[in-house]
Image (tube, grey):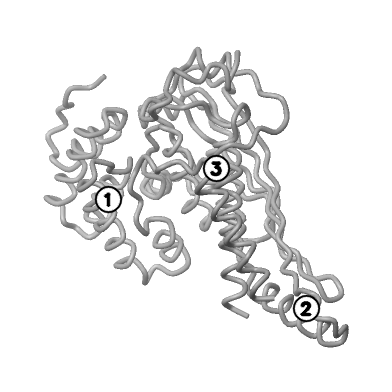
C-alpha cells in the first residue's frame, strides 16, 4: 500500500516537474497554511504574522514579493495598534503594486488623520 | 495511516499542479470581455457559503489568492479585505455577493472582483468508504461595468483507497480504518487548492495571463476571442 501510494506520489510529482511545472511568480512561504491555521483558531495570529514576515523577507530576496502580503502584515500591525509599522507596510505595498493605490491611500489617510488624499488614480 | 494520507494528498496536489499547468480539456471559452476589460487588480471577496458546513468560507480564503496571483494578477489582501468589509457592516457574504460589482471599484480601486460560491463541502460515509467532495462556482465581474468577464465551476472528490493485499478480510478492515480517519477529519484543503488551481490555470478555460506574468499579452491563441 505504501509503495503504491509512493509510486503515485512520485509519478505525479515527476509529471509535474518534467511536463511543465511553472516556476512560481511570487514567493508565498507558509502564507496559505498559516492563514488556514489562523482561520481555525485566532490564537494562531502570531503564527500568521511570522509566516507573512518570512514570506516577505524571502520574496524581497529573490525579487518575487507576492501581492497583498505587505498589506496583510500592515493590517495585523494596525489591529495591534502599531500604527507606525502599519503605515510603513501600507506605503510599501502601494509603492510596489500600483493596483493597490486606492485602497492603500484610504488606509494611509485613515492612519495619518490628515484626510489629504495622496496621488490617486 | 497519517503518512499514507499525507502521501495520497501530496499525490493529489502534485497531480493537480501538473493538470493545472498544461491540461487542455473542453473547448476554450471566449475571452472577448476579459480582453476588453484587461484587468490588473482582482479583489476576492469572502466566499458565499451555500453548504451546511459553517467553517467552509473561513477556510476557503486561505486558498484563493495564490492561484489567481500566480496567473499574473495583483490580488488584494484577502484577509484584510474580509475584515474591512466586516467593519463596514458587511460580514454577511450574501449581502456582499448581491452588491453591484461597481461598488467595489469605488471602495477598493479594483478592476475586477472574484465571487466564489461554495456549493459543496462534505464528507460522505457509505458502508465502509468515505468520499470527500467540494464544489465551487467562480464568477469574475468588472468593477467598472459589473458585467461578467469569466466564470467557471469545479467539483473535486477524494476517496482514500486501501489496496488489495490478497486477504479480503484484512483489506476490509484496513479500508474501514482509512475511511474512518477521513470521515473523522476530512481534509478539504488539498481538494480546494486543486479546484482553484484547475479553475484558474487550465489552458483555454482558466484566466489568461495577467500583467505580472511573462506570458502577458502573448496567449491569444490559447485564450481566444
Residue tagged 2: B175
Q: Residue at x 49, y 44 (%)?
A: A21
**Alpha carbons under labels 2 and 1: distance apart:** 46 Å
Q: Where is residue B223 in the image (x, y as percent from the top left)?
A: 58, 21
The quadrant of the picture occupied by the C terminus of chain A is top left
User: Which subunit holds the residue at mark 2?
Assistant: B
Q: Which residue is drawn at 61% across and 43% down?
A: B19
Q: Which quarter of the picture shows residue A1?
A: bottom right
**Alpha carbons under labels 3 and 2: distance apart:** 33 Å
Residue tagged 1: A75
Residue tagged 3: A19
Q: In the displayed structure, would residue B153 be above or below residue B132?
A: above
Image position of A116 (left or right of B212)? left
| Mark 1 closeness class: few <14, some 14–19, many ≥20 residues within 10 Å | many
Query: In the structure shown, which secondary structural element does the residue marked by tag 1 occupy?
Result: helix
Q: Residue at x 39, y 28 (%)?
A: B110
Q: Which quarter of the picture shows residue A34?
A: bottom left
**Alpha carbons under labels 1 and 3: distance apart:** 39 Å
Q: Where is residue B121 in the image (x, y as percent from the top left)?
A: 67, 57
* Earlier sequence position, callout 1 versus callout 3: 3
Q: Position of residue A71 (x, y in %)?
A: 28, 45
CB within 8 Å, label 3 to label 2: no
Q: In the displayed structure, would residue A98 be above or below residue A35?
A: above
Amino acid at each position: 500500500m505504501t509503495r503504491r501510494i509512493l509510486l503515485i506520489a512520485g509519478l505525479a510529482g515527476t509529471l509535474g516537474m518534467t511536463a511543465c511545472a511553472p516556476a512560481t511568480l511570487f514567493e508565498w512561504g507558509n502564507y496559505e497554511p498559516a492563514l488556514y491555521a489562523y482561520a481555525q483558531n485566532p490564537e494562531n495570529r502570531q503564527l500568521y504574522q511570522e509566516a507573512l514576515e518570512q514570506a516577505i523577507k524571502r520574496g524581497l530576496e529573490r525579487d518575487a514579493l507576492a501581492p497583498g502580503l505587505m498589506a496583510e502584515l500592515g493590517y495585523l500591525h494596525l489591529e495591534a495598534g502599531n500604527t507606525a509599522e502599519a503605515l510603513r507596510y501600507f506605503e510599501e505595498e502601494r509603492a510596489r503594486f500600483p493596483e493597490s493605490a486606492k485602497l492603500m491611500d484610504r488606509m494611509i489617510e485613515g492612519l495619518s488623520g490628515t484626510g489629504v488624499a495622496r496621488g490617486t488614480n | 495511516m497519517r503518512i499514507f494520507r499525507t502521501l495520497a494528498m501530496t499525490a493529489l496536489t502534485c497531480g493537480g499542479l501538473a493538470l493545472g499547468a498544461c491540461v487542455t480539456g473542453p473547448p476554450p471559452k471566449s475571452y472577448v470581455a476579459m480582453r476588453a476589460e484587461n484587468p490588473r487588480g482582482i479583489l476576492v471577496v469572502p466566499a458565499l457559503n451555500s453548504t451546511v458546513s459553517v467553517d467552509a468560507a473561513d477556510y476557503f480564503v486561505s486558498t484563493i489568492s495564490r492561484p489567481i496571483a500566480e496567473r499574473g494578477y495583483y490580488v488584494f489582501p484577502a484577509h484584510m479585505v474580509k475584515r474591512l468589509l466586516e467593519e463596514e457592516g458587511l460580514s454577511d457574504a450574501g449581502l456582499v455577493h448581491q452588491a453591484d460589482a461597481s461598488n467595489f471599484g469605488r471602495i477598493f480601486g479594483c478592476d475586477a472582483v472574484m465571487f466564489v460560491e461554495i456549493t459543496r463541502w462534505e464528507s460522505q460515509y457509505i458502508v465502509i468508504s468515505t468520499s470527500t467532495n467540494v464544489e465551487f462556482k467562480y464568477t469574475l465581474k468588472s468593477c467598472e461595468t459589473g458585467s461578467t468577464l469569466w466564470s467557471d465551476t469545479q467539483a473535486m472528490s477524494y476517496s482514500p483507497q486501501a489496496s488489495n493485499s490478497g486477504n479480503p478480510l484484512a483489506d476490509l478492515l484496513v479500508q474501514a480504518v482509512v475511511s474512518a480517519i477521513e470521515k473523522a477529519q476530512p481534509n478539504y484543503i488539498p481538494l480546494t487548492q486543486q479546484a482553484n488551481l484547475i479553475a484558474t490555470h487550465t489552458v483555454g478555460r482558466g484566466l489568461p495571463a495577467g500583467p505580472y506574468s511573462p506570458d502577458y499579452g502573448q496567449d491569444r491563441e490559447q485564450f481566444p476571442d
